[in-house]
Amino acid sequence: CSIPHLAAPQFPVKNAQTLRKNMTDEEKRLWYNFLKKLPFPVNRQKNIGNFIVDFYIASKKLVIELDGYQHFEEEHEKADKLRDAELRKLGLRVLRYTNDDIKKHFFEVCLEIAEISKADIIIEELLADE
């Protein structure tokens, strides 16, 4: 499949493992500087049905996606909308951020995720090294 987030049904686990090993700089920043420190488990490149989501917080039914430039192409925008609709049918909430959001508004992105996930944290302490 030409769209990176739509996994071929017979290969989703292998694809997820590969994606975990090859995270983008923005995914690494969000993972290592914030999500990994949350007080509940967060999965990276998680298989959900035939999809691989960037980050998943099962206890909160929350999917977090980071979108690079290719997601602004018409084909990808349509695929993302269909994908999000399928994930919502499973009772999941999908948050989407652009790579620019991570680069330019990291604190605000983390604050929004913390608020939506109801993480009982002091975000300034969590991001002290940022």
Image (cartoon, rainbow, N blue to C red):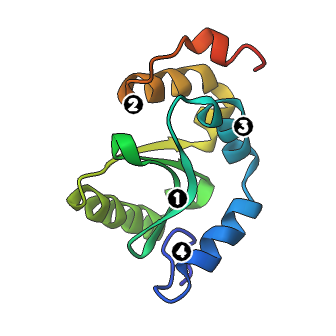
Q: Residue at x 36, y 28 (%)?
A: 116
* Kind of residue sitting beneath label 3: Tyr
Instruction: Give the amino acid at mark 2.
Output: Ser
Q: Can you give x and y, in whole percent of width and height, for residue 107 in the image?
A: 60, 20
CA distance for labels 4 and 3: 26 Å
Query: 115 above or below 47?
Result: above
Name which residue type carries label 4.
Ile
Of labels 1 and 4, the one closer to you: 4
Q: Nearer the viewer, residue 32 or 80?
A: 32
* SS for dot 1: helix
Q: Of callouts 2 and 3, which one flags the residue occurring earlier in the amino acid sequence?
A: 3
Query: 22 or 117, which lies in front?
Result: 117
Q: Are marks 2 and 1 in contact (CB under 8 Å)?
A: no
The residue under label 3 is: 32
Circle 4 residue: 3
In three-dimensional space, the C-alpha distance between marks 4 and 2, rounded to whole angstroms, equals 28 Å
Mark nearest the camera among 3 and 1 is 3
Give the number of marks: 4
The residue where tag 2 is placed is 117
Q: Residues within 10 Å of mark 4 (few under 14, many from 20)?
A: few
N-term-proximal mark, 1 vs 4: 4
Secondary-structure class at tag 2: helix
What whole-number distance in Å separates the C-alpha atoms at marks 3 and 1?
23 Å
User: Earlier along the polypeptide chain: callout 2 or callout 1?
Assistant: 1
| Distance from Cα at disc 2 to Cα at disc 1 | 25 Å
The local secondary structure at tag 3 comes to: helix
